[in-house]
Amino acid sequence: MHTDTDRCVRAVRSKDARFDGWFFTAVLTTRIYCRPSCPAVPPKVRNMSFYPSAAACQQAGFRACKRCRPDTSPGSPEWNVRADSVARAMRLIQDGVVDREGVPGLAARLGYSARQIERQLLAELGAGPLALARAQRARTARVLIETTALPMAEVAFAAGFSSIRTFNDTVREVFALAPGELRTRAARGAGTPHTPGVIALRLPYRTPLRPGNLFGHLAATAVPGVEEWRDGAYRRTLTLPHGHGVVALSPQPGHIACRLSLTDPRDLTQAISRCRRLLDLDADPVAVDEQLRADPLLAPLVEAAPGRRVPRTVDAAEFAVRAVLGQQVSTAAARTHAARLVTAHGVPVEDREGGLTHLFPAPDALAGLDPEALALPRSRRATLTTLVAALADGSLRLGEGTDWDEARAGLSALPGFGPWTVEVIAMRALGDPDAFLPTDLGIRKAARHLGLPSTPAALTARATRWRPWRAYAVQYLWTVDDHPINHLPA
């Protein structure tokens, strides 16, 4: 979008927050860059330049605006819609792969050479993987500086910087303030003191957002010991690269309040990325709803509750296991099966604020489970053990950088994986916005109620007009049934 100057200028002049994250405005006279909705007086058109990413702005020598804080914009929705190598690279960079494995590790995960990835990212984003990762480290550093009392040396290494000097130079260059000045400014504006061991931050999103189906779904399907709804917040444990964590997420006007307790602050970037993905916070609800509203049979559902998101997951492998446990059983039964698996194979954790007790077991921990110990039909046991073995040995990969078509093919090749299981994993674990569940009982009931075709083939053909947002259409169709997944818990 940043190449369409007229459209960008209109967005800046109208201070349209819907475009935050889509592009950034660099002001040639002041050498700062802003989000489109910056409250400052818009500069003259001849002084504006537009960039596709914050990293590109920084690489061109611009610093972040202190008023609109463009580093806190929602992420571009493009990376959730697309499945090409650039989108997959962006999802992996957001998950901290470059910091952990370097550019060669990123390229290996995508199946390309490092030079190809560099060239593709430069062409689309104006910055290579190192510059994109650097911009992300700067954002992480700012969060740690402003929300914790960690010494600056610990902040530097937790954010992923290799030295204190690089940390200081980057913060000054990006924010035009020294790290100590950032902390002082944040302390002056803080309404409440920091809680030791807890990182509190706001997760921005594009409006509108309907929290009922998001938090209702997560709470209704919560696995005891791993997830819970407590005091108006969805809480769960997180398995992270350097340790584990506990997160509490609660809907607030204009943002999602996020409270993180991490055993290692180096995991902050990954934790934030996974929470945003879990709640689908980088979606563009206006674009989604505009297309779905064009269908007269779907329009009343969209008008009644616009801004629905797709509840996703923090761990694709975890969700795949849970999807198998939930085959052809009620929500309550699926939770019971998952809770037994967690108690038997999950890693115990301590939760001082609630009732969380375990991390969900990783595929390696489940690889040696005894099928006879599972209270499941024999065919379901075979499905689960085959899935776990494929995940553990790497023959099946599910994650941020996974090619959606390849993942579907790999899942379909496993015994016991029908269209419903494959598509629900594609929708919630892989993040494909066009995944569709024509065989789902709730979808078929909704189709009959609305006058849509109710057979899977006919409904799939009818749903082509909803593409590429069929996963969002599923969320609206599910609202026809008055199920707890559609409502915030009491």
Image (cartoon, rainbow, N blue to C red):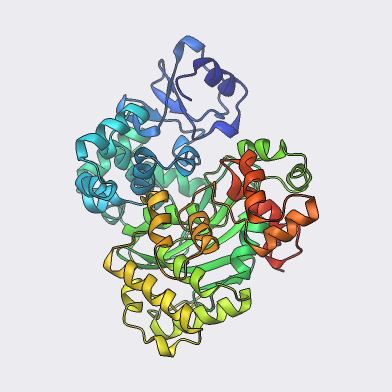
The picture quadrant where one finds residue 293 is: top right
Q: Single out the residue that lies furthest toward the bottom.
A: 373
Q: Single out the residue that lies furthest toward the top.
A: 46
Instruction: Please name whichever residue, 442 or 483, is drawn nearer the observer in this view of the structure.
Output: 442
Please report the residue visible at 20 percent of the width from the left and 49 percent of the height from the top. 162
Instruction: Please name whichever residue, 411 or 230, is drawn nearer the observer in this view of the structure.
Output: 411
Please state if 85 lies on the left or on the right of 35 as rendered. Answer: left
Please report the residue visible at 56 percent of the width from the left and 76 percent of the height from the top. 334
Please state if 104 lies on the left or on the right of 26 as rendered. Answer: left
Residue 14 at least partly seen:
yes
Residue 324, placed above or below residue 260: below
Residue 339 x %, y %: 51, 81
Please report the residue visible at 47 percent of the width from the left and 59 percent of the height from the top. 194
The picture quadrant where one finds residue 448 is: bottom right
Residue 240, placed above or below residue 403: below
Residue 283 x %, y %: 55, 43
